[in-house]
Amino acid sequence: MTQHPPKERIEQLRHLINDYRYHYHVLDESTMSEAAADSLKHELSQLEEQYPELVTPDSPTQRVAGVALDKFEKVTHIYPMLSLNDVFDRSEVQAWVTRIDKLLPGRTHEFFCDIKMDGLACALIYRDGVFVRAVTRGNGQIGEDVTVNVRTIPSVPMNLRTVKGYEAFLTGRTEVRGEIVIFKKDFDALNAAQKAAGKPLYANPRNLAAGTIRQLDPEQVASRPLTFRAYNLIREDAADVPTNSYAYETLRALGVAANQQASVFTSVDDIMTFVDEWADKRQQLPFNTDGLVVKVNDRQLFEELGIVGKAPRAAVAYKYPAEEATTVVKDIVISIGRTGAATPVAVFDPVHVAGTTVQHASLHNADEIARLDIRIGDTVVIFKAGDIIPQVQNVITDLRPSDSKPFYFEEALQHQYPELTFERPEGEAVYRVQGSSSDLILKRSIEYYASRGALDIDTLGEKNVNALVDAGLVKDLADIYTVTVDDLMKIDRFANISAKKLVAAIGEKKTPALEKFILGLGIRHVGTQTAIDLATAFESVDALAVATIDQLEAIDGIGTVVAESIVAWFSDPDNEALLKKFVSVGVTPHYQRKTGKLIGKAFVITGTLETMSRDQAAERIRNLGGTFQSSIAKDTDYLVAGSNVGASKLTKAKQYGTAVISEADLEELLG
Ligand code: IVH
């Protein structure tokens, strides 16, 4: 073996790892698998351990969390970090542009628009292309040195890339400004883990990102999924960066991620088109946003326009309509999820927030209730983040009625579920049904779902249910639809025939009658008649899921207790997830209208039809009260055979006594 320090190998490894990082974070593409990249990083850190004299501060290994700090040092920003004035509609954008026109008469302007990220601002300082310091915004003049923490963020490059044409940025001081965010999916995963561990949930990605950066222990920071996106590039010589669009282009070339959505426009009309385009599409962005940033593109003009107060005249933040609203808490009910966890849900007077009506929100757990000090009768601020799930932001205690009483969780459990006992395991925030046998609850709920009055699934009785759950094959109601014959064969209880029989029996019940499905969900206080009434009134699970208490109470026979129980069930995040899962495994409850000449008739179409599409046929059948099924079951009345019909379908039809009819026959039935 050679005894020479493997300088060349180390340099090659660094280059390759940096290149991987650049492609991944800036270009959103992958040059090798994560595992391969990890393996190279491992080799590099071993070499550096062996040859410490070859370690450089910008080596990818230097991202590792350093020692914990006592406090952060204060740092004065060379260029203050300004804030932005808000504009809310077209007329305010127009007024802003008119003001600029007045101040700079006779000059045309380009406007640079980007998504406004909802995170915390941070300045990264590079010296001769090497990352040396990160500073928070602080009060705009003085921030805190959070270098050790920011080092752990994978999308922050430890050195700027060397690219032809951009060499100037690798000498002297280059400041990169941007936002540190936590992606929505990462945040949801973190909260799911918190919940599973019975720990309190984080309020929103921005607070979590801000709290994380202020952590004194970089190890903690490294474990949180922070992402950096740049929006500004500053050089001592302002001429290095003539426009904001050039700043973005340069940032990407240097290996710093900047939003790809950012664009240049020349008129208010075009700015507003961009505003409208992102009004809805922003929900699909990986991070939360409440608006856009619009800046004069030319940086010389930007400077000339100057600063008023703490904000530059040359930029504004366009804010989308408020995602907050106030309402009154009518009740707090507790929903018992499939794991036996008790989730409190606040029920409100329905209120419109960011395009939808909100009438309930999960309060997550007893700790969250204590933190909010929320009481029935309180006026609360409802907040809807970029995503769909509304949350209680805070209580307006000044509006608290004099007779309000605090919410006592254990008392409420006792009141709502007198037959159950609950426990709150040491160190957990969540109450669970005692012995929680979360398995026990699951078993009983599957049994109920499969029982005769509900889905009526053949052979899925107590013993088989117990076996499925005990084997870990089924973790919620929807899972029964994913069980295969092979899965079952691994359980002692099943032989080939019994396994096939059970799988077929479950598969047959993928299009249950809506009222049976509603009943099968096991919503407290919803029995057979109520399930039928609900199906008749709402005609779909989706409509029922967003029903208001008032709408429910308007149905004969449904009172407050039942209405609240229904609302609580549909607002439990576990149940929302369960309903989505039913859809994804292909369960589509159907509602049979009570009018029309095809009432009670179920159709399956096979092969290709000449005069209408399958969807059109389905719609026409449904309009006449018939039901449309995706596959033949015992209750199928007609199999409509188009051209190219498979033999197996016909055999099945024969077996079930289903009438096989032609497309012409169908036309006649549809009249
Ligand atoms: S440009 C003069 N672009 O919004 C400040 N800022 O309200 C010019 N922000 O402190 C900033 N996304 O932390 C800009 N695409 C974006 C942004 C953005 C988020 C934040 C930034 C700034 C605050 C201004």
Image: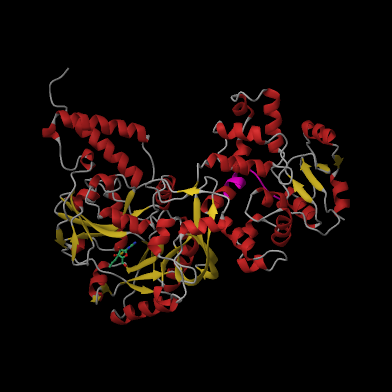
483 magenta-colored: no
Q: Quadrant of residue 96?
A: bottom left
| Whether residue 52 is situated above or below residue 548 in the rendered picture | above
Residue stretch rendered in magenta on the structure: 580-590
Residue 122 shows in the view: yes
Residue visible at 65% across and 32% down?
A: 463
In the image: residue 448, left or right of residue 632? left
| Whether residue 167 is situated above or below residue 506 in the rendered picture | below
Residue 320 x/y as whole percent: 44, 69
Viewer-proximal residue among 655 and 265:
655
Residue visible at 25% across and 68% down?
A: 82
Residue 230 shows in the view: no
585 magenta-colored: yes
Q: Quadrant of residue 181?
A: bottom left
Viewer-proximal residue among 534 and 13:
534
Q: Coloring scheme of the render?
A: secondary structure
The furthest residue to the left:
53
Residue visible at 71% across and 49% down?
A: 516
Tell me how many marks there are: 0
Quadrant position of the C terminus in the picture: bottom right
Residue 39 x/y as whole percent: 30, 30
